[in-house]
Amino acid sequence: MHDFYMIDAKVEEVARALGLMELGLTQDVTALSGGQRTKVLLAKLLLEKPDILLLDEPTNYLDQEHIVWLTRYLQDYENAFILISHDVPFLNSVVNIIYHMDNKKLDRYVGDYDKFREVYEMKKSQLEAAYNRQQQEIADLKDFVARNKARVATRNMAMSRQKKLDNMDLIELAEEKPKPEFSFKTARTPSRILFETQDLVIGYDEPLSRPMALTMERGEKLVVRGANGIGKTTLLKSLLGLIPALSGSVETGDFLEIGYFEQETPQDIETTCLEEIWQEFPSLNQAEVRAALAKCGLTTKHIESRVRVLSGGEQAKVRLCKLMNRESNLLVLDEPTNHLDVDAKDELKRALKEYRGSVLMVCHEPEFYKDVATRVLDLSEWTTKVV
């Protein structure tokens, strides 16, 4: 029933579809990039042929080609699946029911994400109109009671209005969630050339690229894209001098002030959000640290929690908070949209467009970077891997 006798062929079929054959099925998982690990977990899940798939942000770390493959797979999937995702084009392609969690209440909407937004906004404006009408009615009733309860002739009418007030089902509006406001401070103007590589070969034990000649100039907003595992993060770390190049050199410009956004928060982190920002900016007082975190869309509860218990999106906001409070003239961002919700992504896009410095960013979401990038670099052109 579960294709036991065909399992080797099935493993190969799924592994090939997800681009795992080039890695080699005997490869140690701990040596893989975030995107490659996501693919291994997806392959494992798909081979189990479960009655229901539970997918928690499956497109995070996946490159464009494999998001397209996963989209097709889910469109043809014969069983049910429940999906959490902030990738709107992906959602619109694969879902037909949306459950929206708002104000501790779960509401069901039929249709894709765009349809949900349309109906949700309409319901929200209807509720606000009803709330305003009710508030006006409450004000009128209270006013009548206050003016008439002391007079004998009108006391009964006043008591009747008071009874209506007491029995009224009050309409409550959902609390407005804090919306992030990102803005990046700019440092002094750097030299015209920010970095230049001469025959740069990146990698760890073995080369991930052919010799590269790359140049980035002041004012550019450069996006690096390409398949998982070809060395996008390795390239950023090599340019920043965090890991040594296998050969070749990187020349950096003068007066560079770099803000680096890492793909993940370290697993062993023990600090609270408050402590994490305070360690980085000891001159700020507690009110200023709280205000800085609140500006990133974090609530008091988040701010006082340990960083490691937060969701991926909340952890990303803590890392963005560090970048916002330090002056920079080059932002180096490694997949900054992973885990971020739709509002936070829109706000980050706006902040990056307004940022007067330069940006070097790894990103898999054309929807996000197409309005920001002045140049897109496909790392597949330089890779030694089969992609």
Image (cartoon, rainbow, N blue to C red):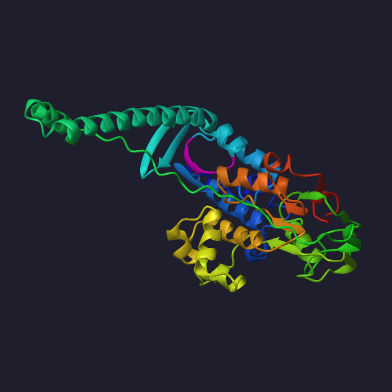
Q: Is residue 88 left or right of residue 165?
A: right
Is residue 346 something one can see in this rendering?
A: yes
Q: Which residue corresponds to the image point at 59% horizontal and 32% vertical from the top-left?
A: 93
Seen in the picture, residue 283 relative to 290 is either above or below; the reply is below
Residue situated in front as seen by the camera: 50 or 31: 31
Q: Residue furthest left?
A: 152
Examine the rendering and report whether any part of residue 315 can be seen: no
x then y, percent, for residue 179: 52, 47
Q: Count the marks.
A: 0
Asked whether residue 105 is drawn in magenta, I would say no
Using the image as rendered, state which of residue 142 and residue 50 is in the foreground: 142
Which is nearer the eye, 283 or 317? 283
Q: Please name whichever residue, 100 or 168, is drawn nearer the observer in this view of the structure.
A: 168
For the point 57% across and 51% down, the residue is 339
Confirm whether the magenta stretch covers residue 84: yes
Position of 174 relative to 22 (above/below): above
For the record, the magenta segment spans 79-87
Residue 156 at x, y percent in the picture: 8, 28
Q: Is residue 249 above or below residue 372?
A: below
In this rendering, the answer to whether 78 lies above or below 361 is above
Residue 44 image position (x, y, % from top left) = 56, 52
Q: Position of residue 300 (x, y in %)?
A: 44, 59
